[in-house]
Image (cartoon, grey):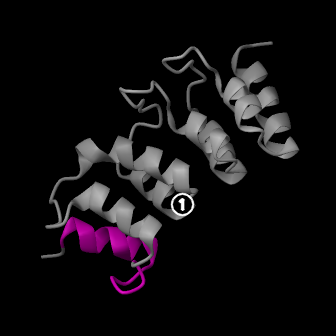
Amino acid sequence: MTTLAETALKELGLSPEQYSGTKKRDLWFLLFGSEGRTNPVPALGEALLHCAYYGIMDAAKWVVAEGASINFVDPNTGMNALHIAVGRNHLDMALYLVEKGIAFVPDNQGRMPTTIAAECEVSDEMCDFIVEAEAKAEGV
């Protein structure tokens, strides 16, 4: 019987040896723990936030396909994956999340993704994209 961990690696096109980089190893432990969980669904939302932080697109697509809520919010910060992707200047991740229909909501400090972009001094491309996407989401 194939474990979920083995299935995840196969879906990501990686062998365990290839999955040794720090960012991906951190994601692995978040999803499966050191012993390899058999049901990582409760951790999938957190894994999506982790993917957004590090810009790991292949893993983000996988956790969404496995059932992660695109609108998962960190209970401590109120940030969703879009806040994080914008703040880390991961344009490809932000594009993906918006395409998937992520909600434009304020975090626990009342900051919208556009505010995060301004505070983090992200690229002009990210600023242009997030301003337009947020305005469209708000019907402006």
Residue drawn at (66%, 28%) of the image: 113
As drawn, 107 above or below 30? above
The N terminus is located in which quarter?
bottom left
- List the residue tagged with mark 1: 56
Q: Quadrant of residue 17?
A: bottom left
On the image, the x and y values in percent for residue 88 come to 64, 47
Image point 30% across, 55% down: which residue? 30
Q: Is residue 48 left or right of residue 86?
A: left
Residue 48 horizontal/vertical position (percent): 44, 47
Q: How many marks?
A: 1
Looking at the image, residue 120 lies above or below residue 89: above
Q: Is residue 128 left or right of residue 116?
A: right
Which of the two residues, 68 or 107, is positioned nearer the viewer here? 107
Residue 9 visible in the picture: yes
First to last magenta residue range: 3-19
Q: Residue at x 28, y 62 (%)?
A: 29
Judge by depth and name the residue closer to the eye, 108 or 28.
108
Amino acid on which the number 1 mark rests in the picture = Ile
Question: Callout 1: 10 Å neighbours few (<14), some, many (20+)?
Answer: some
Q: Residue 91: image x %, image y %? A: 72, 49
Question: Residue 136: which quarter of the image?
Answer: top right
Left or right of 97? Residue 15 is left
Instruction: Label 1: state its secondary structure.
Output: loop
Is 70 a magenta residue? Answer: no
User: Is residue 64 among what the camera can see?
Assistant: no
